[in-house]
């Protein structure tokens, strides 16, 4: 319920920004493609589905801290523009702090002390690596982009000579279709 | 033996399992993942089925994917690769997504269930639509099957017939990029709505405008030859934007704030013009289908068929004897078409016989392992809990319904709905804008007994069947204006649902309501705008809390939500 509440707060802030600054609403769409597609947030699994409950609790505990810093930066930025939004984000921060405390409490209870510390440090390092990876994607694209363009040009040369026939009609669809074929 | 149809990777993922006897189970992946329109491989739905029906290779006859994976990927790529540098952004995006698409369907299936390769088969995109359409009519050879969508395997429009020996003929096809579906989606994008989600908003908005831009749009999409002018589009170049600069030069700045009066008027006029182009195109397509097949009964499938305003306007033109749009005509319903293909491929001279539109699982099966009493308190003091629920409605309460089998299409048909008395104007407005968080230009839909329909509404007989699953609009009569004006759209139409099944709880509650002085309920799907419809009791609980709804009608009683 907290997360739904937070989502609604962010949506209201977004709508306020759109109205006040006459921004195109599509420009404010949150689509973290580079993160989502690269599996930071698993595309075909939710994190809680992939991790055991113990490990998930540690994941939340470790990552909440990083998220908190980002959210504080964001709320400070909003402070002068939309003071009411700043207030609301402080409430979100309190909620998130509570979630983080619960997670850490649970993780400490269900792991022995040294194992907990080890897992916690591992999760923090992984999180930093993920951020490093996401932040360097633009740099990596300098290398991969020309390679992809070259591949496209080669394919386009090959396909230039292809004359694919398209059937507008088919007198016996079931007989002419190969059910085992993907093409 | 079970036949399983799967639709996934591009639009709402879904699975349909049947043995063509006593088991039919349709599931959408979004129900489990809670991501609206989830297009990922439906692993959660399949896990549910594997567990509930103890699926293994021995009891599965075929698993059928609804289209040809490589063909789907290739046809769009092939069109854009002709100009690799101009279309590089789209092509790179398409290349990068190669491994995320349906090409790896077999691998994805085998992660869940070990099944030999010869049990995995592939239908064709429009054929799956056609075979789903054939499963909702009784005399299959009497109909011509028309499919119209954005694109599927490079096809955008198709016309099929099926004879009494189940020989299927494709009479005509139109190819990518010439697509009325993509044209309408581009308008959706231009107006600032999400593609695949906002088309119905464009349809509602169109009733507020005049088709002032119709002639301009006719230069962009030829309604007679079904050809698109690609100078105005970018869907083959840009993965994030559908319209070109030339389009914006003519129609002005995109993505304006629609809540401002001046923008609203302009955008409503553009929506109205696009709607008009769609209707003129579809009129020509249906005429073409009738001419080629010699049949005047039509089954229309594909995402375009979800435009119920178009269905209503086409019915006024005396084109056909009957037009049927199945409850889930988009890609999600094609999972049923794929299962039908698997069955036909196996039996050769027979197709699935599905007698109901409620093909989803029963609520008690979904919630077998959840203790309802922890979340809800039974409050009916007598066995006549319907009477108590009706009293609440008459007294101005909004109640939720969660009983019997789950619906399959995008519309809730009473079994997973939110109800309120349609007479109560303020309540209806509150439900629409504050609780459901819909836009003001989208009206809520009425539901009533079939026998009361003519008292309040009128409709051409040739499309009336579609009212059983809200597949079309109808006109409001004077008596409706007098008593239930809150549910009438600005153009005098309503997206009405009629209830015929006398054994259903929805029928009984409407009957009860009638005795207490009201004939019509407002029926809206049990979700908040942009969320999937609720699936299990946990979703029900969370959504009721979010919407501040306190009462819910279930199979065995009337309940109040608990505070936990």
Image (cartoon, rainbow, N blue to C red):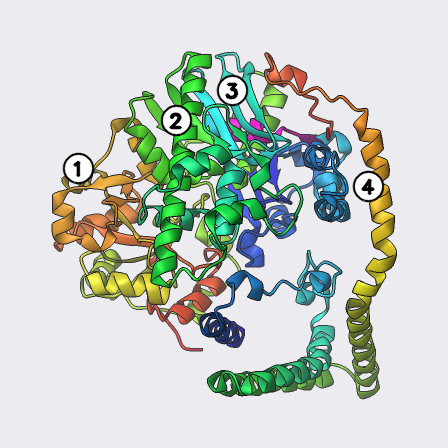
- Residue A137: name its quadrant: bottom right
Callout 1: SS: helix
Residue B394: x and y in percent read: 18, 61
- Residue A120: name its quadrant: bottom right
Residue in front for this viewpoint, B253 or B290: B253
For the residues marked 1 and 2, what is the alpha-carbon distance in whole angstroms?
27 Å
Which of labels 4 and 3 is toward the front? 4
Instruction: Give the residue at mark 3.
Output: B160
Residue A84: x and y in percent read: 46, 85
Identified at 69% across, 25% down, the residue is: A179
Query: Mark on residue B454?
Result: 1
For the residues marked 4 and 1, what is the alpha-carbon distance in whole angstroms?
61 Å
For the residues marked 2 and 3, what is the alpha-carbon distance in whole angstroms?
17 Å
Q: Is residue B78 above or below residue B142?
A: below
Q: Is residue B184 above or below residue B318?
A: below
Q: Check chain identity for marks 2 and 3: say if they share one.
A: yes
| Numbered range of the magenta stretch | B120-132
Q: Is residue B497 left or right of residue A105?
A: left
For the residues marked 4 and 3, what is the alpha-carbon distance in whole angstroms?
36 Å
Q: Are marks 2 and 3 in contact (CB under 8 Å)?
A: no
Examine the residues drawn in magenta and state their main secondary structure: helix
Magenta residue check for B131: yes
Instruction: Give the residue at mark 4.
Output: A152
For the residues marked 3 and 1, what is the alpha-carbon distance in whole angstroms?
34 Å
**What's the chain of the residue with tag 2?**
B
Instruction: Give the residue at mark 2.
Output: B283
């Amino acid at each position: 319920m907290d997360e739904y509440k937070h989502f609604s707060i962010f949506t209201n802030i977004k709508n306020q920004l759109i109205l006040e600054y006459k921004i195109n609403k599509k420009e404010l769409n949150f689509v973290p493609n580079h993160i989502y597609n690269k599996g930071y947030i698993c595309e075909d699994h939710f994190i809680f589905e992939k991790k055991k409950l113990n490990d998930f609790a540690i994941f939340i505990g470790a990552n909440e801290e990083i998220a908190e810093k980002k959210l504080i930066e964001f709320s400070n930025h909003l402070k002068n523009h939309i003071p009411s939004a700043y207030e609301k984000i402080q409430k979100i921060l309190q909620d998130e702090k509570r979630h983080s405390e619960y997670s850490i409490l649970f993780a400490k209870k269900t792991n022995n002390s040294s194992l907990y510390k080890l897992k916690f440090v591992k999760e923090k390092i992984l999180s930093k690596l993920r951020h490093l990876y996401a932040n360097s994607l633009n740099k990596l694209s300098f290398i991969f982009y020309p390679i992809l363009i070259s591949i496209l040009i080669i394919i386009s040369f090959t396909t230039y000579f292809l004359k694919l026939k398209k059937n507008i009609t088919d007198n016996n669809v079931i007989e002419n279709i190969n059910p085992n074929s993907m093409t | 033996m079970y036949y399983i149809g799967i639709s996934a990777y591009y639009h709402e993922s879904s699975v349909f399992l049947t043995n063509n006897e006593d088991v039919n189970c349709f599931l959408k992946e979004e129900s489990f993942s809670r991501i609206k329109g989830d297009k990922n491989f439906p692993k959660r739905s399949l896990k549910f089925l594997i567990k509930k029906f103890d699926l293994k290779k021995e009891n599965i006859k075929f698993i059928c994917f609804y289209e040809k994976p490589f063909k789907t990927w290739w046809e769009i790529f092939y069109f854009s690769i002709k100009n690799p540098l101009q279309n590089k952004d789209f092509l790179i995006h398409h290349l990068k997504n190669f491994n995320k698409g349906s090409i790896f369907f077999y691998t994805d299936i085998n992660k869940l269930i070990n099944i030999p390769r010869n049990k995995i088969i592939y239908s064709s995109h429009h054929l799956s639509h056609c075979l789903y359409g054939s499963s909702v009519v009784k005399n299959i050879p009497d109909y011509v099957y028309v499919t119209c969508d954005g694109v599927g395997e490079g096809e955008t429009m198709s016309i099929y017939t099926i004879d009494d020996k189940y020989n299927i003929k494709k009479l005509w096809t139109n190819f990518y990029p010439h697509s009325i579906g993509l044209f309408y989606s581009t308008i959706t994008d231009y107006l600032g709505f999400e593609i695949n989600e906002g088309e119905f908003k464009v349809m509602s908005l169109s009733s507020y405008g005049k088709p002032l831009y119709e002639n301009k749009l006719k230069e962009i999409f030829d309604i007679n030859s079904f050809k698109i002018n690609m100078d105005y589009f970018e869907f083959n170049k840009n993965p994030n934007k559908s319209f070109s600069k030339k389009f914006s030069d003519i129609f002005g700045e995109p993505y304006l704030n629609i809540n401002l009066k001046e923008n609203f008027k302009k955008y409503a006029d553009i929506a109205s013009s696009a709607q008009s182009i769609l209707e003129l195109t579809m009129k020509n397509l249906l005429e073409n289908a009738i001419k080629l097949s010699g049949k005047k009964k039509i089954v229309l499938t594909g995402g375009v068929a979800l435009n119920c305003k178009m269905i209503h306007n086409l019915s006024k033109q005396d084109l056909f004897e009957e037009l049927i749009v199945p409850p889930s005509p988009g890609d999600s319903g094609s999972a049923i078409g794929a299962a039908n293909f698997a069955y036909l491929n196996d039996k050769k001279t027979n197709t699935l016989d599905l007698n109901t539109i409620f093909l989803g699982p029963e609520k008690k099966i979904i919630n077998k392992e959840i203790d309802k009493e922890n979340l809800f308190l039974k409050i009916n003091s007598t066995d006549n809990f319907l009477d108590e629920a009706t009293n609440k409605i008459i007294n101005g309460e909004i109640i939720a319904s969660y009983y019997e089998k789950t619906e399959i299409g995008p519309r809730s048909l009473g079994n997973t709905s939110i109800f309120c008395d349609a007479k109560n104007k303020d309540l209806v407005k509150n439900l629409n804008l504050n609780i459901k968080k819909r836009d003001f230009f989208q009206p809520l839909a009425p539901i009533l007994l079939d026998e009361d329909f003519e008292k309040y509404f009128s409709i051409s007989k040739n499309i009336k069947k579609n009212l059983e699953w809200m597949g079309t609009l109808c006109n409001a009569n004077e008596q409706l204006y007098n008593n239930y004006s809150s549910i009438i759209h600005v153009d005098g139409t309503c997206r009405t649902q009629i209830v015929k099944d006398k054994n259903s709880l929805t029928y009984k509650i409407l009957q009860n309501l009638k005795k207490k002085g009201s004939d019509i309920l407002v029926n809206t799907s049990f979700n908040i705008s942009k969320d999937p419809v609720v699936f299990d009791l946990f979703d029900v609980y969370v959504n009721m809390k979010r919407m501040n709804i306190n009462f819910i009608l279930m199979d065995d009683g009337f309940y109040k939500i608990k505070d936990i």
